[in-house]
Image: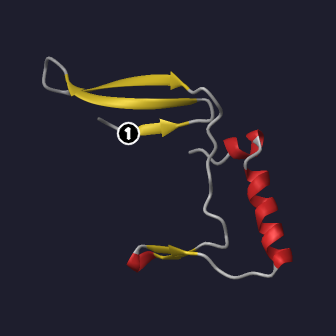
Amino acid sequence: MGTTRFSSDRLTFEFIYPDSRGAAGLLAVEIATPERIVYMPVPEWVIEQIWQGEVTGSYHFLSDAERMLDKVRVSLEEDRNRLLFP
């Protein structure tokens, strides 16, 4: 199996297989989704310890936490979220 690509309204699965000459062939299968897919960016309050593979939270004043949550909510709007897909 090759890669899986996400877009806001479908999934694309790529299958790699050898053709009759032994070269690699690619079959892409698109499936419509029953609801919109959203990209969930890592919020700014998450701290990643890359070398240890840990993801932890952090502490913030309530007003800052509400601002950060609003930023994440806005990123889920359809037009803005579509820009986050590769």
Q: Residue furthest top?
A: 20
Residue 80: percent from left, percent from top: 75, 46
Whether residue 29 is visible = yes
Is 53 situated left or right of 67 in this image? left
Q: Residue furthest front?
A: 62
Is 15 situated left or right of 47 in this image? left
Q: Quadrant of residue 50?
A: bottom left
Rendered position, 70 above or below 38: below
Rendered position, 7 above or below 47: above
Q: Secondary structure under badge 1?
A: loop
**Which residue is located at x 77 percent, y 67 percent?**
68
Quick one: label 1, few (<14), some, or many (20+) residues within 10 Å?
few
**Which residue is located at x 67 percent, y 70 percent?**
44
Rendered position, 44 above or below 84: below
Residue 73: percent from left, percent from top: 77, 54
Q: Quadrant of the N terminus?
A: top left
Is 49 situated left or right of 78 in this image? left
Is 17 situated left or right of 10 in this image? left
**Which residue is located at x 74 percent, y 58 percent?**
72
Q: Nearer the viewer, residue 40 or 25?
A: 40
Whether residue 24 is visible = no
Q: Quadrant of the C terminus?
A: top right
Residue 40: percent from left, percent from top: 62, 53
Amino acid type, label 1: Thr
**Which residue is located at x 75 percent, y 39 percent?**
78
Q: How many marks?
A: 1
Q: Quadrant of residue 17?
A: top left
Q: Nearer the viewer, residue 82 or 39?
A: 39
Reading the image, the residue beneath label 1 is: 3
Rendered position, 82 above or below 48: above
